[in-house]
Amino acid sequence: MAGRRPETPVIFLGVALVAAAALLFALEWNLTFFQDTWAFLLQRQGSSVGDFLRPHNEHLVLLPVVITKFCVVVFGMTSARPEMVVMTLTLLGSATLLFVYVRRRVGPWLALLAVLPVLFLGSAWMILLWPFEIEFSGAMMAGLAAMLLLEREDRRGDAWACLLLVISIGFGSLGLSFIAAAIIDLFQKRRSRGLRRAYLVVVPLVLYLLWYAGWGHTAPHHLTLHNVLDSPRYLFDGLASSIASLLGLSTATGAEPAEPEWGRPLLIGLIALAAFGKWRRPGISPRFWPAAAAALSYWLLAAFNYIPGREAASNRYVYAGAIFVLMMAADLLQGVRFGRRALWVAAAVALFAIGPNLVQMKEGADILKGQSLVTRADTAALEIARRTVPADFSLTPENAGTLANVAILPGQYLEAVDAHGSPAFSEEELVTAPSEDRHWADILLSKVLPLSISSRQAAFTAQEAGRCIVLSGGSGSAPPEVRLQPGLTKIWIGSGPSTELTARRFATDEYPVDLGSAPGSSLTLLRIPHDEAAQPWYLHFEASQRALVCR
């Protein structure tokens, strides 16, 4: 390849890191907090030990919680950008450490080509674009650094590796895989360096077990005999999905995992090729086994705790799996010399893989953008209705338009907003938001204020008609809607069939709020509580009979 100077691959790596950071910021810069992040923001607002050490699902998430709290205290809750910056730094740090790891084994050019697909691994878009997943990227960065330090084979390296293993498990359960790698390293070097260095795995393991005894055991686990027996298939599919993703052959779309149709034959072929290579050239680098232990423990732990939504091909699992595959491949290829032609072929494969991954990254960013918009609309509705919204009101797909906001309880949310600022749309922004998001804001507002109606049989009189808006029945010149103000509105329906009442506030060209029906010859009372917005409500109905609206 061109550029034989040793610093050239490092320069290209720097360019790739900058390009990756620019792309990630461009895709996520206008996103807001998403899904599980709300659990950190709202359910851990205190400063008790439990707020930091309480498990999330079954995971220790001490450092992600610390980072979230730090960002909120320093920068407020108006934007998720500070967390995005920290997340991106961990991704770039992991990529750089992977480059160092692979370069030590197969040289700088192959190390560069190994890192490029990881930097743009769009099939793992949830890891790249969602700061909550720092539990993966942070644990990966600290774990890779620990493995590199173990290769120093000195006391200082062991001490720093111990600290980094503690940091790795502090980010998330992925750190356990690096402890497994360190155990293999300890066993391999027991004769040359003794067992006095066992502290480097004992310390993080004891700390983890103490956490588990105090807090971790309270989380539900999903370990079943079926999961254990099915773990070999899960392991195979996990490795296959990682290989397919690295090569740009993942067929996943959006957030849905896909069967690794390309990955399975590729994995079988690569295993056969590796076996043939070792038959021709016997011997496996001792460094392979710690990396293999990390990969094996990673996939088996995931398999043992499988539930629907945690498939081996899920994009949030592909990121770590891809890095482990590259680490093992580099260890197996250590000592193999590659000519210029082989390097050009590898470059073509790496560059080809980036294209499909960029498409998947854009698809993921679009999903998060849509979720961000509806979240900002939903939270705007909560703030508008803060006088009346129940503190424990549940945001469901039926009233909020998304499952991603179930962790937002209005009482906790408004408390956090008062302390740290609001990420929601302002009223002015909500007026100009996309129509779908205004649609859900109206529906949620109607529930949390709430709008209420009651009807009874009654007939209007000429006296009433003199003080109300009279709407002619049928398809004549009746206005399509009536502007309403907070308070009590009387709706008189003349003799005839029932009339369906609908309303809108921020929505346009539609009436998303279903108020129910008003029977003929009836008086319906519509109550609209006062709130924090000036935008009026609009009532709509199409009746075949005469009607009066008295505001």
Image: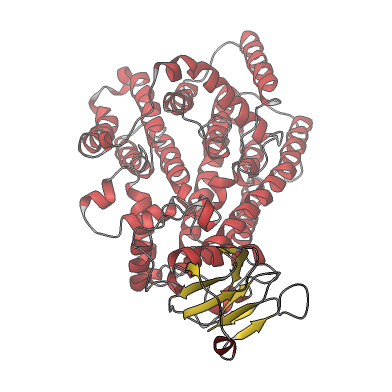
Q: Position of residue 17 (x, y in %)?
A: 60, 53
Q: Is residue 123 visible?
A: yes
Up-down: is 323 above or below 528? above
Residue nearest the viewer, comparing 431 with 518 = 518
Q: Position of residue 263 (x, y in %)?
A: 67, 25
Q: Is residue 81 visible?
A: no
Q: Is residue 443 left or right of residue 507?
A: left
Q: Is residue 240 left or right of residue 203?
A: right
Q: Position of residue 103 (x, y in %)?
A: 57, 37
Which residue occupies 46% across, 59% down?
83
Which residue occupies 79% across, 31% down?
341
- Image quadrant in which you'd find residue 497: bottom right
Which quarter shows the N terminus?
Answer: top right
Up-down: is 218 above or below 420? above
Which residue occupies 46% across, 30% down?
307
Residue nearest the viewer, comparing 44 with 111 = 44
Up-down: is 268 above or below 518? above
- Image quadrant in which you'd find residue 290: top left
**Colouring:** secondary structure
Q: Position of residue 493 (x, y in %)?
A: 60, 73
Q: Which residue is the extreme one toward the top?
A: 279
**Could you tell me how many numbered marks the image carries?**
0
Residue nearest the viewer, comparing 55 with 392 = 392
- Image quadrant in which you'd find residue 59: top left
Which residue occupies 44% across, 17% down?
226
Residue nearest the viewer, comparing 475 with 533 = 475
Up-down: is 432 above or below 263? below
